[in-house]
Image (tube, grey):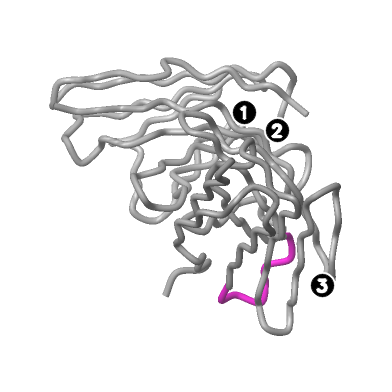
Amino acid sequence: SAVISQKPSRDICQRGTSLTIQCQVDSQVTMMFWYRQQPGQSLTLIATANQGSEATYESGFVIDKFPISRPNLTFSTLTVSNMSPEDSSIYLCSDNGGGPYGYTFGSGTRLTVV
Amino acid sequence: QKEVEQDPGPLSVPEGAIVSLNCTYSNSAFQYFMWYRQYSRKGPELLMYTYSSGNKEDGRFTAQVDKSSKYISLFIRDSQPSDSATYLCAVSTNDYKLSFGAGTTVTVRA
């Protein structure tokens, strides 16, 4: 299975600023996903990122708030824009593991907005 | 109604006990069923997956799926302190998107 390096591992940011999270996969993958994990809650899918096309966002998430880039088959970024304390969460990326299960996750970015 | 409901726990068991974790799902279109384990400050790692009703065993772990009742379970036999983690059930269709339960935190006491 793939190995995904995610950074930063944590950050404390001022409200109104933006943070870009990076995920690097050690092999080429067709699909990458971005999730949010709020304390005590399940992982919620933000968007699906495919190389060469715009990301597909889930209900409740918009491109202006969470712009995503997917410049090649091994890399993706998620930006959390114009942050507020409600954006404090853990953000995770994953690949699709070549099938509908068996996905690999990054170690997560723990974001605190003050 | 959430797509996946998971018993919230937390669970605390003595070493050697059997751990039983459960989830229910609402959409019969889900075809793939997974259990992930997440240690503190780490990303989820896949424990087991299956796509059919019945049992699947892997060492001390058994995953059970009952599609007729939309119920999935994970059993951990001879639990060890190293099994202390949060366990997440997940389901998906052919669209590759995972829907997760909220997770159950398990503590195995030495």
Q: Quadrant of residue B17?
A: bottom right
On the question of residue A71 being in view, the answer is no
Tag 1: residue type?
A: Gln
What span is colored magenta in the figure? Answer: B25-32
Q: Residues within 10 Å of mark 1 (few under 14, many from 20)?
A: some
| Discs 1/2, front | 2
Task: Give how far apart the Cα atoms at labels 3 and 2 are.
Answer: 29 Å
Question: Could you tell me residue B14's position as x and y percent?
Answer: 59, 51
The local secondary structure at tag 1 comes to loop
Placement of B22 over or under B37, stated as above or below: below
Question: Could you tell me residue B72's position as x and y percent?
Answer: 67, 68
Q: Are marks 1 and 2 in contact (CB under 8 Å)?
A: yes
Q: Is residue B40 magenta?
A: no
Residue holding disc 1? A51
Residue B53 is labelled as 3
Placement of B40 over or under B101, stated as above or below: above
In this view, which residue lies farthest toward the bottom?
B68
Chain of the residue displaying label 2: A
Residue holding disc 2? A30
Q: Residue at x 84, y 66 (%)?
A: B55
Q: Are marks 3 and 2 in contact (CB under 8 Å)?
A: no
State which quarter of the image contains the C terminus of chain B.
Answer: top right
Residue A93 is labelled as none
Question: Could you tell me residue B32's position as x and y percent?
Answer: 73, 60
Chain of the residue displaying label 3: B
Task: Give how far apart the Cα atoms at labels 3 and 1 are.
Answer: 35 Å
